[in-house]
Amino acid sequence: MTDKSSRARLGRRGLAVALAIVVLVAGAYVWLNTNLFGREDVCAGLVSGDAAESVFAGSGRISDGGGTDSPSSDRVSFTCTVESSSFLLGPDTEYLRISASRERGDFPFSDRGRWPSPASVSFFSGGSGGATGGVGSDHGWVLLPEACTTADGPAVIEGYAPKGSDPMEFARLLTEAANNTAERAGCTTGKPLTAPDSLDTAPEPRAVPSGTVCGSADLTFPGPATRPEATERIQESAGPTWACEISDHATYVVSQEPRLLAAIRSSPGFTEHPRVAGLQVSGFDARHVVADCAGTPTYFSMEVDLGYTSALEKPGTPRLGALFDNFIDVIGERFGCDAR
């Protein structure tokens, strides 16, 4: 009887030890490989832990190292790198970089070395109260409220997400960061910005059809008369921003997005320029301008690439001024621009 009782006690103790080990292992797994009971926010409270976790493709523990780094005295500016690490699920650590800075208002269209091609971006603009921004494959941005604009220009939240991230979750995170940054800087205006409910799918490259450019038979090909093989991406959604990229040759943009136009016109260096295609314009230079199209401020930009510049001496290659005039003549007509 005593032996049976001893064995029973030992069995119960063994079971308790086994259960304790299971709980310990499960707790360690949760602690090392998920964000359960982890950070509620990162980047000095500018980004919630849930928002950051939702952007990462895999599960992991969320941290932000030293938090935010403020590169200037501007209360809007900061940089922050968030990482998601997993001890048991693999050696790779994913990184999410978030920052805020002041940019020239047409930054998504004029700085091709830093920002993705506008023809490959899903733009969003919700009108009154909706956030204005764009999300590419791993890079996105959201404008802060107009009250955050100073003499140094508009303020922008910028983010780099890991591959495989959900673009909708990324857009929500950037919008949240924009709201919290504006609140910290004391430049909120009424209700917080709202993230988009959906995103248009960015267009895929396709061969440039014979006889047309960017879907138009009247737009001049930005290259020699004997057209080389090229692909094009065209933003064909009904949104206020239209873009077309002809690979290695040129990228065209037209935008009537009110917040972007306000950001552009409030940027340093925005001045009146000579007429383009018969239209009175203001802007930053000869190929980044704003015209009045049927009472609506309309932005036009054209960026050229090596495929065009290297072919300038070849027969049939249009000169830069003629190419831009043709662009405004042809595409501007769709947006109510008429110099007559």
Image (cartoon, rainbow, N blue to C red):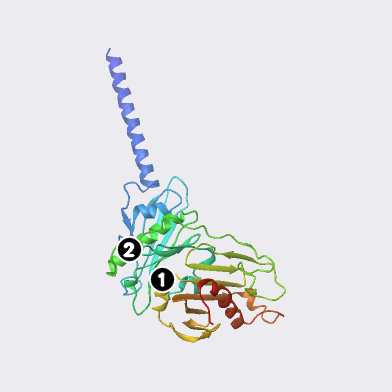
Amino acid at pointer 2: Asn
Visible residue check, residue 309: yes
Visible residue check, residue 117: no
Residue 6 found in image quarter: top left
Residue 245 sits above or below residue 90 on the image: below
Q: Position of residue 177 (x, y in %)?
A: 35, 62
Residue 160 found in image quarter: bottom left
Amino acid at pointer 1: Pro
What residue sits 30% from the left and 71% below the top? 75
Residue that badge 1 annotates = 258
Q: Secondary structure at mark 1?
A: helix
What residue sits 44% from the left and 55% below the top? 198
Q: Position of residue 196 (x, y in %)?
A: 41, 58
Q: Is residue 109 left or right of residue 17?
A: right
Specify the quadrant that holds the C terminus: bottom right
The crowd level at tag 1 (other Cα within 10 Å; few <14, some 14-19, many 20+) is: some
Q: Nearer the viewer, residue 15 or 329?
A: 329
Q: Work out whether mark 2 precedes mark 1 in sequence or the reverse, and give the earlier one.
A: 2
Q: Is residue 97 left or right of residue 229?
A: left
Residue that badge 2 annotates = 179
Q: Position of residue 174 (x, y in %)?
A: 39, 61
Residue pushed farthest top?
1
User: Could you give the CA–CA distance between mark 2 and mark 1, rounded to whole angstroms?
Assistant: 19 Å
Mark in front: 2 vs 1: 1
Q: Is residue 152 left or right of residue 89?
A: left
Q: Nearer the viewer, residue 279 or 3?
A: 279
